[in-house]
Amino acid sequence: MVPPITKRPNGGRSDEITRLRTLVDNIPGALFQLQLSSDDHPFFIFASNRLADLCGLTPEKAAEDATILFDTIHPEDRLRVEHSLLSSAQTLLPWQLTFRITHPNGRTIWIEGKALPQRHADGSVLFNGYFHEVTQHKEMERQLQQLNDFLDRHINEELARRMQLQREEERSHQLLIQQSKMAEMGSMIVAIAHQWKQPLNIIGLWAQNLKGDFYFGTLTKESIEETVDRILEQVNFLSQTIEDFRNFFKPSREMVPFSARKCADDVCRLMTADLDRHHITVVFTDGDDGHVLGYPNEFKHVLLNIINNAKDAFLERHVPEPHIDIDLQVTSKTITITISDNAGGIAQELLPERLFEPFVSTKGDQGTGIGLYIARQIVEKMEGSLTARNHDNGAQFLITLPRYQN
């Protein structure tokens, strides 16, 4: 229900002014009317009593000379206040600014001023607005900014520390990888030496036969040609061996289709002399060949690492009749290479995943613990998987790769 309208008692105008004055003097902040004359001279037409609380200046003093109020503005802010007022007077856009003033008690406080400009016929501009203190808000902003600066500095320091640790870990990681490669290269150099041993012996024997035929007068054109042909055959074999090893250590720069079976054949061929020396038999299970998309030379390193690990286990455990079985299974979508040995298997605490973690070695102080870690990274880079398990009386590694579709 709408309340009834009561009539204003006699003398209501005086009461209204009193109530308005009470309201003006009790609201937060100070109301004001500031006029800029046509020559930009400021003076207050009106200011509420709250002005004295803010800046220690009574309304009467402010009305006498507005520059007294401007003198309380912090020196670093005064020019900004004057420019903003003049700009608002020219554009008649609302004026709003936060600035500092120095109270007569010596305390510096923050004031926010807002006003709407109104141009008069004589060219002067009247600002109707109010001031209110925002010191507490500014102090909170300052503390928040300090906290943000502290957090930014702390975060940046922590990031720098972690990046430094990461760089150091990467350097250590690369050093271990390099050590692993050097160990692998040393193993391959031994393999080259054994691979060369037989051809060099054959060349030596044919050279001695040639010399003997000469001394015994049995040297003929046919025997010379046969001897030279045999020697050149072995030289070509030596040259091809070096080329095979050189290509083996050359990184593949881009993914290409390649035969998984041929990679396995190449690795075993390069290791033939070393494996034969230790009487290690490698048996391929007959199966279809298949192509995968990836890095052939890096993939050969995966196979080499697994076969070398088996060889080292055979020698360490003195396994009689050591053998390695390589099985290739091809489906419409995948190719799986299974490499099994009879070297006694892998310690159970390393299965199924810890075996592929960096710096975990099955060879004690003799290993870097990085070979199988790198092998898995290579296979996963080719979108495949590398796993290990114990099978029968040995270890079994399974490499599964997507089959390349033409």
Image: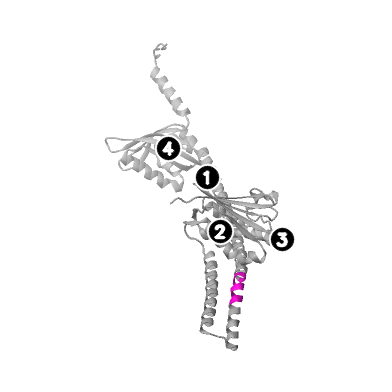
Between disc 3 and disc 4, the foreground one is: 3
Q: Could you say whether the residue bearing mark 2 is in a helix, strand or loop?
A: helix
Classed neighbour count for the residue bearing mark 3: other residues with Cα under 10 Å, few (<14), some (14–19), many (≥20): few
Using the image, tell me which numbered label, if any, was put on residue 316. 3
Q: Amino acid at mark 3?
A: Glu
Residue 35 position within the rendered picture, expressed as x and y whole percent measured from the top left? 35, 37
Structural distance between the alpha carbons of marks 1 and 2: 64 Å
Q: Are marks 1 and 2 in contact (CB under 8 Å)?
A: no
Q: Could you say whether the residue bearing mark 4 is in a helix, strand or loop?
A: strand
Residue 127 position within the rendered picture, expressed as x and y whole percent measured from the top left? 36, 35
Residue 320 position within the rendered picture, expressed as x and y whole percent measured from the top left? 72, 59
Q: Amino acid at mark 2?
A: Ala
As for residue 299 lying within the magenta part, the answer is no
Q: Quadrant of the N terminus?
A: top left
Among the two numbered marks 4 and 2 on one chain, the one whose residue lies closer to the N terminus: 4
Q: Are marks 3 and 2 in contact (CB under 8 Å)?
A: no
Q: At 61% from the left edge and 72% from the top edge, which residue is drawn?
A: 198
Q: Which is more toward the observer, 19 or 366?
A: 366
Task: Please state if 219 lies on the left or on the right of 367 as rendered.
Answer: left
Task: Please state if 155 lies on the left or on the right of 117 as rendered.
Answer: right
Q: Could you say whether the residue bearing mark 3 is in a helix, strand or loop?
A: helix
Classed neighbour count for the residue bearing mark 4: other residues with Cα under 10 Å, few (<14), some (14–19), many (≥20): many
The residue that label 2 is drawn on is: 264
Q: Amino acid at mark 4?
A: Gly
Q: Quadrant of residue 227?
A: bottom right
Q: Which residues are magenta?
A: 193-202
The residue that label 4 is drawn on is: 113
Q: Quadrant of residue 245?
A: bottom right
Between disc 1 and disc 2, the foreground one is: 2
The residue that label 1 is drawn on is: 145
Residue 298 visible (yes or no): no
